[in-house]
Image (cartoon, helix red, strand yellow):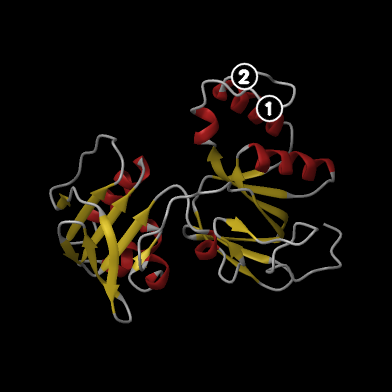
Amino acid sequence: MYDIAIIGKGPAGISAAINAFARNKNVIMFGGDSKKVLSSPSIPNYPGLPDIKGTELVEKLNFHLSQTNTSFSDKRVTAVYSMGDSFSIQAEQDMYEAKALILAVGVDFKKTIEGEDTFLGNGVSYCATCDAPLYKGKKVAVIGYNHESIEETNFLSEICSKVYYIPMHNEKYSFNSNVEVVLDKPIKFQGEMQAKQLVLQNSKIEADGFFVLKDSYPLSSLVPGLLTDGPHVVVNKYMETNCWRKPNSTI
């Protein structure tokens, strides 16, 4: 049981971990280095470090973080559950417990595919390594937004009879023979109780399961019941969400 779990390893998450360490808290952090910061050629408005390169800022942040006792997990967090006086965090196939949770994932303005939220857990999944066994010998489709989706698609191809891959990026890819690449734009998922079809701009794919693999997911899907306002989390004056159920905590 950790005192605090932090999801997000950008400047905000690292700052939270450093301050938690100063207060003698036992912390675990999920996530990798911020791609947005890494890709910045110059950052003119970070206090004390004017016009620093993104790669240099990440290096300095990671050095400061290394001076703490923060534990790390590079596994993708797929769900968070409020347990009343603690939180249960599912990171791929592993589960973690923490007394408090800090969301430092930033703001993602990418729109979800129509029906993605509706069918999540009912034919739509965010984790190939978690749910691949459910589709052994079956047909699945992957909507891939990053390099990791390429690796997970080849993993799925070893378990499933057929895999459709819809690339949403410009990276090079190489797949096993039972993977079919579909160059089209996903529009919506269709089905009754479970997603059975992916409608694309110029075609349709029928499959037993669908995987949406990207770097970040809607917070309302990540934390069931979390109150949001568009891409933002609704909090009170103490920066507490509606999922917090421990008002007398000293954390």
Whichever of labels 2 and 1 marks the residue nearer the N terminus, that label is 1
Label 2 neighbour load within 10 Å: few <14, some 14-19, many 20+: some
Position of residue 10 relative to residue 1, above or below, is above
Q: Give the mark count.
A: 2
Relative image position of residue 190 (x, y in whole percent): 27, 72
Q: Name which residue lies at 24% across and 38% down.
A: 173
Residue type, mark 2 in image:
Ile
Can you say which quadrant of the picture contains the N terminus?
bottom right
**What residue sits right under mark 1 in the picture?**
46
Can you say which quadrant of the picture contains the C terminus?
bottom right
Q: What is the number of the mark on residue 52?
A: 2
Q: Are marks 2 and 1 in contact (CB under 8 Å)?
A: yes
Front in this rendered view, residue 28 or 200: 200
Q: Name which residue lies at 86% across and 59% down.
A: 250
Relative image position of residue 73 (x, y in whole percent): 56, 47
Position of residue 24 relative to residue 201, above or below, is above
Residue type, mark 1 in image:
Tyr
Residue at the left extreme of this rendering: 177
As helix, strand or loop, the secondary structure at mark 2 comes to: loop
Label 1 neighbour load within 10 Å: few <14, some 14-19, many 20+: few
